[in-house]
Image: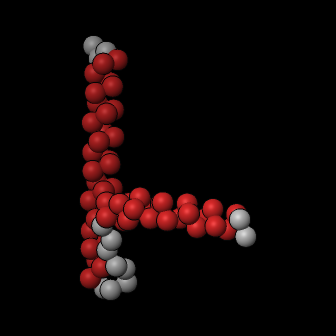
Amino acid sequence: MVDAVDLDLCSSSVQDAFVIAVEQQARERLERLSALKRITPVDMTKLSQQALDLAPVRALLCLEDAYR
């Protein structure tokens, strides 16, 4: 007999496999587009860090605009 725990584990494994497959397909598509020069790859971790670094500057610019 199959219990709820077994079904949860099975469902989780299926979800994990699906996510891995989708990620792999996306990675392959990005590589193809990059090779065709249709996109420029960007390191999202660096992009995120740049946004954080610029946040204080943006805040100051918003304050300047508020006092105009």
Can residue 29 be seen in this snapshot? no
Residue depicted at x 31% and y 85%: 36
Foreground of the two, 44 or 19: 44
Above or below for 3 versus 7: above
Give the image's coloring scheme: secondary structure
Please identify the residue farthest to the right as the structure is shown.
Answer: 68
Foreground of the two, 28 or 48: 48
* Quarter the N terminus occupies: top left
* Quarter the C terminus occupies: bottom right
Foreground of the two, 7 or 25: 25
Can residue 3 be seen in this snapshot? yes
Left or right of 62 on screen, residue 42: left
Where is residue 24 shown, x and y percent of the image? 26, 59
Q: Quadrant of residue 5?
A: top left
Above or below for 30 versus 59: below
Residue depicted at x 44% and y 65%: 54
Residue depicted at x 58% and y 67%: 61
For the image, the number of numbered tags is 0
Where is residue 48 shown, x and y percent of the image? 38, 60
Foreground of the two, 43 or 8: 43
